[in-house]
Amino acid sequence: MKLIFEKSVEGRRATRFDLTGVPKAIKHLDEKYLRKADAELPELGECDVVRHFTALSRMNFGVDTNFYPLGSCTMKYNPKMTEVIAGMSDFADLHPLLPQLRSGGALTQGALQVLYDMDKMLSEICGMKAFTMQPMAGSHGELTGIMIIAAYHRKQGNTHKDTIIIPDSAHGTNPASASIAGYKVKTIPSDENGVMDLKLLKEAINDKVAGLMLTCPNTLGLFNPHVNEICDLIHSVDGLAYYDGANLNAIVGKVRPGDIGFDVVHLNLHKTFATPHGGGGPGAGPVGVCEKLEQFLPIAVVRKHEDGAFYLQYDLPDSIGYIAPFYGNFGIVLRAYAYILRLGAKGLRRVSENAVLNANYIKERLKDYYDLPFGQTCKHECVFSASRQNANGVHAMDVAKALIDRGFHPPTMYFPLIVKEALMIEPTETESKEVIDEFIEAMIDIAKQVQDNPQAVLDTPKTTPVSRLDDVLAARKPNIASL
């Protein structure tokens, strides 16, 4: 097929194709599939196009451009080494329906080995018996874990168990996942130390409890010191302990959830193991289980023959079935695989050490300028309150907008809900002291400006196309052109 050009009636250059040599099936398409008029394609030079999209890219804010201290979401730098590996044609060009075994050409053996090895590595890191790579997000992993818990209770005949216990300091998707799986949710408030109230938990434990979901460290960045006792309490009524591992980057290489009593674990590869995050995807939320739950894992499971060949096992009668197409978000799993191999055991421990160090450094530097509801040593993130600034009419949202003018993405605001005017800051382990110091100075400068000239803070941001967006109107009429 040869591309030619003709001049249209309107004077524009129109595209035409010489169909000589084109297969009959294409040449004789039904008339209803053919254009009745020329496509209105823009006539632009390459230079104009490149400058347009380059200008758009410079308006974007991401981990490759600036500090992005969203608490809980862990927006950390993604190593380009893992991007290169994920783009290798031997992986990227594979189709999931290619033959599995060596006799079929062995094209998929490398990909199957990645899934097999990740199962073993994540099991070792978390103290679990086995992992599935299928869940395609953290919340998807949560639902998968709760479905496994439900499958276990069905197998045990525990039809009376209808409740999942969740602390108020959990990730917001925990109660949603439990509800979608058909469970009632019992919320346990936090105590004066910012962790789930143990006394209230003991009062809530009964034979109807199917399990407990614990975010640990929680959304305040605090590790629950009673975690062993909590797991024992749940097990005493044949319940299962679920570990929300979205914050594993705070303890990776230091604590294994399986060793302290958890039966089910989900991880966010895009948070702990530095794969892309944001924009609705891509993501991966592998789920690990203890030995008695292995039979309930989603199909298919990667196995290894005695001769070393890898294959997929589908004959799992107690499996919860498919929870994602094929084998999950393979490209994300591959990035995390390369990241873990590159860092090794020593490097993974440094991840948690640096994440905890950076968060506590920020906490200590800013505690004289913003209210700190819980002052004990935190893990990967710290939570402040802008309640002090409220006295001058300034809210957490105003602090966030003032940060935009200073070149920083705002931290998470108004979450967790148990902290009034919350500012949730997670520096991650990938930021240097110099960058963190610049952020701290910006936060201090805003706090001082609130005291001296609060209106200046209320007038920010001034560096964005819309200087002071009306948040209520933006929510009700999201079309910017109508503002």
Image: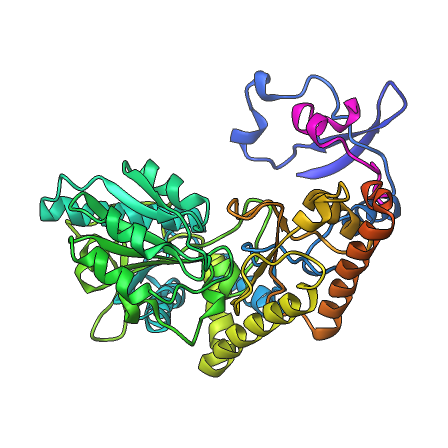
Queried whether the magenta region covers residue 271, the answer comes back as no
Residue 426 in sight from this viewpoint: yes
- x and y, in percent, of residue 405 in the image: 82, 50
Relative to 477, residue 66 above or below: below
Left/right of residue 365 with respect to residue 340 in the rendered view: right
Left/right of residue 443 with respect to residue 286 in the rendered view: right
The residue depicted at 49 percent of the width and 67 percent of the height is 249
The residue depicted at 73 percent of the width and 52 percent of the height is 61
Judging depth in this view, the residue of 188 and 24 nearest the camera is 188
Q: How is the image coloured?
A: rainbow
Left/right of residue 411 with respect to residue 213 in the rendered view: right
Question: Which residue, as the protein is rendered here, is positioned at the far left?
Answer: 157
Relative to 125, residue 234 above or below: above
Residue range corresponding to the magenta coloring: 461-483
The residue depicted at 44 percent of the width and 80 percent of the height is 345
Judging depth in this view, the residue of 34 and 472 nearest the camera is 472
- x and y, in percent, of residue 357 in the image: 58, 74
Relative to 392, residue 346 above or below: below
Residue 293 in sight from this viewpoint: no
Left/right of residue 138 with respect to residue 14 in the rendered view: left
- x and y, in percent, of residue 335 in the image: 51, 64
Quarter of the figure with the N terminus:
top right
Query: Quadrant of the rendered structure where residue 367 is?
Result: bottom right
